[in-house]
Image: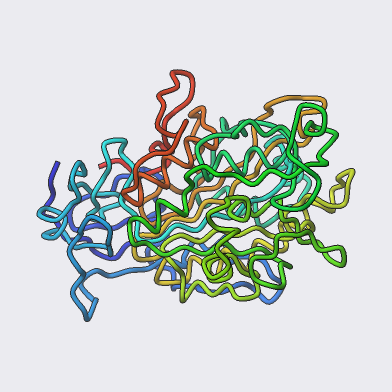
């Protein structure tokens, strides 16, 4: 499918195009509002950033680069028609020209992935209704969320490994990336026992990105020293929430590891790589204290507001980017209730908005496949295996042609 139209001014919640608008969630009144690019002084989002994104394609001083396999910047209509990678077709999303994968996922310039912890969708919604999570509530009303997203295992680590390698790799515990505890077995790796080491030798998302000449960085809040393979006894850094440290081709290559896996203090979306992974610390990701209280969610809600505002104000996001906020698993970590629905937020110039809720049944493999399709990468493991009961990608979150 091709298009020759040029987009006009596009807002995240109101796509105004010279040819079409496709999300069906726009509020025409938003078009007249001024842009608002930062957090409130109280840390909350300006209407969850509803007016942060404003882009006029005709205003760009420099021409966009054409699409090529392995490199991509957002394109204009003429380049879309002639320059999509093999297998991708020229289309539009919210009136913006875009190349789409066969799955319907748009080709993306940058991906931001923020991982939160151990929260069922029902728990977060209850907190929002109790006015204890105003920023997540505001984002839910302005962007797109899901009602059918699930983790793929318990406890935490199998989900992180699955999301970055296409499989849980047989893990059933929060084991350590290195150490002298010995290899994991059925006796020392379970929901309640994790006294083992589990470095992974499988191909992972970072390998794919580098093969495609794309940049990536994993940020761990509280990590301190780059490539920190050990939990912080003095703080709230959890190595099990930074899956890239578990892959042996990363952890054993010191120069590679220290260049790509660093403390969150260095995060700057104005200098974003093609793929950014963010692991908040155990307070900011809602994990601690244990057992969880209402304060867990409020802590995460407070942390997320300025982070989201900063990301969606960046050119990396505005010019064809994607921000996904997702949780690893549900409240009970597999001990009481298995596979409860977990929250997911999807923000992009190409995404539906205005409080859209996707009812598609999805999981971490669906998200991995979305990232891979959006960055023109082959699919890993279960991300590339059709599962009749689960959608292959998050395509439903993106605006149609």
User: Is residue 132 something that shows in the picture?
Assistant: no
Q: Position of residue 180 (x, y in %)?
A: 79, 50
The residue at 18%/45% (across/down) is 86
The residue at 71%/32% (across/down) is 172
Closer-to-camera residue (169/254): 254
Closer-to-camera residue (6/389): 389
User: Is residue 263 something that shows in the picture?
Assistant: yes
Q: Tell me the quadrant of the picture where the N terminus can be found.
A: top left
Q: Position of residue 295 (x, y in %)?
A: 84, 53
Residue at the farthest top position: 388
Q: Position of residue 22 (x, y in %)?
A: 30, 45
The residue at 41%/46% (across/down) is 352
Residue 286 shown left or right of residue 307 in the figure: right
Q: Position of residue 286 (x, y in %)?
A: 76, 51
Q: Is residue 37 above or below residue 180?
A: below
Closer-to-camera residue (113/41): 113
The residue at 64%/66% (across/down) is 227
How many badges with numbers are in the image? Answer: 0
Q: Tell me the quadrant of the picture where the C terminus can be found.
A: top left
């Amino acid at each position: 499918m091709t298009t020759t139209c040029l987009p006009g001014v596009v807002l995240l919640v109101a796509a105004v195009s010279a040819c079409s608008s496709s999300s069906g969630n726009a509020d025409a009144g938003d078009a007249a509002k001024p842009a608002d690019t930062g957090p409130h002084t109280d840390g909350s989002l300006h209407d969850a950033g509803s007016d942060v994104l404003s882009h006029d394609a005709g205003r760009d001083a420099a021409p966009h680069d054409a699409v090529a396999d392995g490199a991509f910047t957002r394109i204009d209509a003429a380049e879309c028609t002639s320059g999509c990678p093999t297998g991708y077709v020229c289309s539009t999303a919210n009136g913006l020209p875009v190349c789409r994968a066969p799955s319907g996922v748009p080709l993306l310039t940058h991906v931001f992935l923020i991982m939160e912890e151990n929260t069922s969708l029902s728990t977060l919604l209850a907190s929002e209704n109790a006015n204890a999570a105003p920023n997540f509530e505001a984002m839910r009303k302005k962007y797109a969320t899901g009602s059918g997203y699930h983790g793929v295992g318990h406890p935490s680590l199998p989900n992180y490994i699955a999301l970055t390698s296409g499989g849980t790799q047989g893990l059933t515990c929060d084991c350590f990336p290195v150490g002298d505890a010995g290899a994991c077995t059925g006796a020392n790796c379970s929901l309640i026992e994790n006294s083992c080491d589990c470095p992974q030798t499988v191909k992972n998302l970072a390998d794919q990105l580098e093969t495609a000449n794309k940049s990536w960085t994993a940020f761990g809040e509280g990590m301190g020293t780059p490539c920190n393979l050990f939990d912080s006894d003095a703080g709230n850094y959890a190595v099990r929430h930074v899956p890239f440290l578990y892959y042996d081709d990363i952890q054993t290559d010191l120069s590679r590891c220290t260049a790509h896996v660093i403390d969150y203090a260095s995060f700057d979306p104005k200098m974003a790589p093609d793929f950014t992974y963010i692991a908040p610390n155990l307070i900011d990701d809602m994990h601690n204290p244990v057992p969880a209280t209402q304060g867990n969610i409020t802590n995460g809600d407070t942390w997320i507001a300025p982070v989201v505002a900063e990301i969606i104000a960046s050119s990396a996001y505005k010019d064809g980017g994607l921000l996904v906020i997702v949780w690893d698993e549900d409240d009970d970590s597999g001990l009481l209730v298995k596979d409860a629905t977990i929250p997911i937020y999807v923000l992009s110039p190409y995404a539906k908005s205005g409080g859209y809720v996707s009812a598609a049944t999805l999981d971490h493999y669906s998200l991995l496949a979305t990232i891979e399709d959006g960055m023109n990468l082959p699919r890993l493991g279960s991300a590339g295996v059709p599962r009749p009961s689960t959608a292959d990608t998050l395509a439903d979150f993106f605006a149609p042609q």
